[in-house]
Amino acid sequence: MKLEFKENGPIVIETGGRCVFRDAQGERVIEKPRVSLCRCGGSANKPFCDSTHKTNGFVAPAAVIEFDEDLVLDVSRL
Ligand code: FES
């Protein structure tokens, strides 16, 4: 799994094709090769990016973190 912090944009997670998303509403499987998480705070669809970062002046550097494990997105305890 890889987390890519896009310059002036979201955190893009390479899922390998599938991940499980959990929040207060429950759990669902996301079958996409990557998901984008908001780090600008402006998305109306948090925790996912809705491209608001392109218009709200968000500035942040690019970076990458890589892991060797399966991904579970669990925001139910945030
Ligand atoms: S990073 Fe894209 S909407 Fe926040």
Image (cartoon, helix red, strand yellow):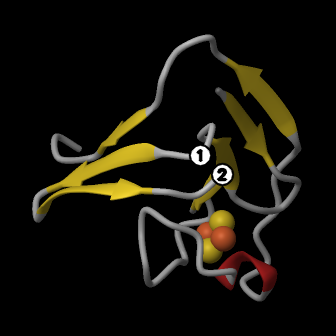
Q: Mark 2: which amino acid?
A: Pro
Taking the image as shown, residue 18 lies to the left or right of residue 10, namely left
Q: Position of residue 30 (x, y in %)?
A: 43, 57
Crowdedness near tag 2: few (<14), some (14–19) or many (≥20) residues, C-alpha within 10 Å = few
Q: Residue 62 carries which label?
A: none
| The N terminus - image quarter | top right
Q: Where is residue 3 in the image (x, y as percent from the top left)?
A: 69, 35
Q: Mark 1: which amino acid?
A: Gly
Q: Is residue 48 above or below residue 39?
A: below
Residue nearest the observer in this picture, 53 or 76: 76
- Which residue, as the protein is rendered here, is positioned at the far top? 68
Question: Residue at image x 72%, y 76%?
Answer: 53
Q: What residue sits right under mark 2 in the picture?
A: 33
Badge 1 marks a residue whose secondary structure is: loop
Question: Residue at image x 87%, y 45%?
Answer: 61
The alpha-carbon separation of the residues under discs 2 and 1 comes to 4 Å
Q: Is residue 12 above or below residue 14?
A: below
Asked if disc 2 and disc 1 are in contact, CB closer than 8 Å, the reply is yes
Ligand 1 placement by image quarter: bottom right
Badge 2 marks a residue whose secondary structure is: loop
Chain-order first, disc 2 or disc 1? 1
Taking the image as shown, residue 64 lies to the left or right of residue 47, namely right
Residue nearest the observer in this picture, 57 or 10: 10
Q: Position of residue 18 (x, y in %)?
A: 49, 45
Asked where in the image residue 74 lies, by quadrant, the reply is top left
- Which residue, as the protein is rendered here, is positioned at the far bottom? 55
Taking the image as shown, residue 49 lies to the left or right of residue 73, namely right
Q: What residue sits right under mark 1 in the picture?
A: 17
Crowdedness near tag 1: few (<14), some (14–19) or many (≥20) residues, C-alpha within 10 Å = few
Taking the image as shown, residue 5 lies to the left or right of residue 41, namely right
Question: Residue at image x 55%, y 77%?
Answer: 42
Question: Residue at image x 88%, y 54%?
Answer: 7
